[in-house]
Image: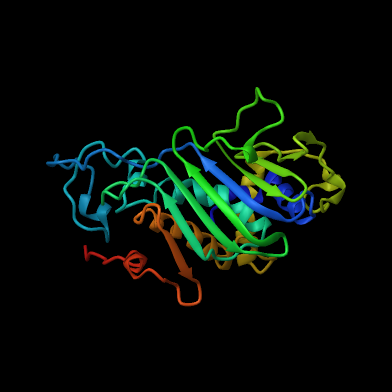
Amino acid sequence: MGIQVHSFYDYKLATQLIQAGVIGKVSKVIAWSQSMWGYDGPVPEGKDPVPEYLDWNLWLGTAKDRDYKEGYYHPANWRKLVDYGCGTLGDMGVHIFDTPYNALSLDIPYTIKNECREPNGYGFPETNVVTYEFPGTKYTTEKIQWIWYDGIGAPAAQKDLELPDPKETLHDQGAMFVGEKGRLFLPHFMELPRLIIDGKYQELDYSIIEESIRPKGVPVRNYDEESKEHYHQFVDACLGNGKCTAPFSYAARLTETILLGVIAGYFPNQTLHWNSETSRFDEEAANKYLDAPYREF
């Protein structure tokens, strides 16, 4: 899966620290992005001439037919619209979720709730607060709660996100692990995880890190090269040399988890119950969003 940070030292380090029990069993993850890949404005009316260089029918592909409107699709605005993207959660969530999801060996959540505005059938909400509950793993308490925030000003201020230096502000994107012994703060991205115990930053113990991650645990980072490692790993696996660390079996579960939160946005403030064995919601009204009619084009 194209989650390049999966192969970055910072994220591998965070995974090893969590799995080594540096903060004990984890009960909560808070993740956020201040990106706002949503659209709360009115549905545009009328249509504009299609530019000569654009095959509009081909661009729409299997999505439903819609009149062209200048400025609503590019650059990157398609991410905000329900027919073409999946909002901030789907866009940034897959990258920011990856390390906590991997580190905690999570599977599929059984409840999902999205606190957001009512759906308008055109754009995703500009702000979302999505709460997941997962069954526990050997790295977590019996149940684990995961809360995702997106939009301007995210996340909401709370004790679990307080940093040791009151002058320090949270990064615009990141994740916080909350465990029995303390917290691990993982900014997104290009920064080392930070260990917080009893309200103070603590030195990381690199001795517990496998030397395969970085010889002798020395935090030497070259992000251009580490990004390439992700692609090399895929090619090597195709050639029969080793395995991918983010294979389809992993990517499918991660994607499923994130898209459940996107679907929950159609039912604001309602807790949805997901049956991973049947791949259906207990709430029948939500099941229509598991598929979409494909237009022949």
* Residue 212 location (% of width, % of height): 80, 54
Give the residue at the far top of this rendering.
Answer: 167
Q: Residue at x 68, y 56 (%)?
A: 103
Looking at the picture, the colour scheme in use is: rainbow
Numbered label tally:
0
Percent of width and height locating residue 87: 40, 47
Quarter that holds the C terminus: bottom left
Q: Nearer the viewer, residue 182 or 76?
A: 182
On the rendered structure, is 78 left or right of 209?
A: left
Quadrant in the picture for residue 249: bottom right
Of residues 279 and 160, the one drawn nearer to the viewer in this rendering: 160
* Residue lying at 40% horizontally and 52% vertically, measured from the top left: 269
- Relative side of 106 to 183, left or right: left
- The residue at the point 65 percent across, 22 percent down is 167
Q: Is residue 73 above or below residue 180?
A: above
Q: Residue 188 is drawn in which quadrant?
A: top right
Residue found 50% across the figure and 43% down from its top: 149
Viewport quadrant of the N terminus: bottom right
Q: Is residue 142 above or below residue 85?
A: below
Residue 160: x percent and y percent?
Answer: 64, 41
**Residue located farthest toward the left when viewing the structure as drawn:** 46
Residue 217: percent from left, percent from top: 83, 45
From the viewer's perspective, tell me whether residue 217 is left or right of residue 280: right
Residue placed most toward the observer, 84 or 149: 149
Q: Is residue 226 left or right of residue 249?
A: right
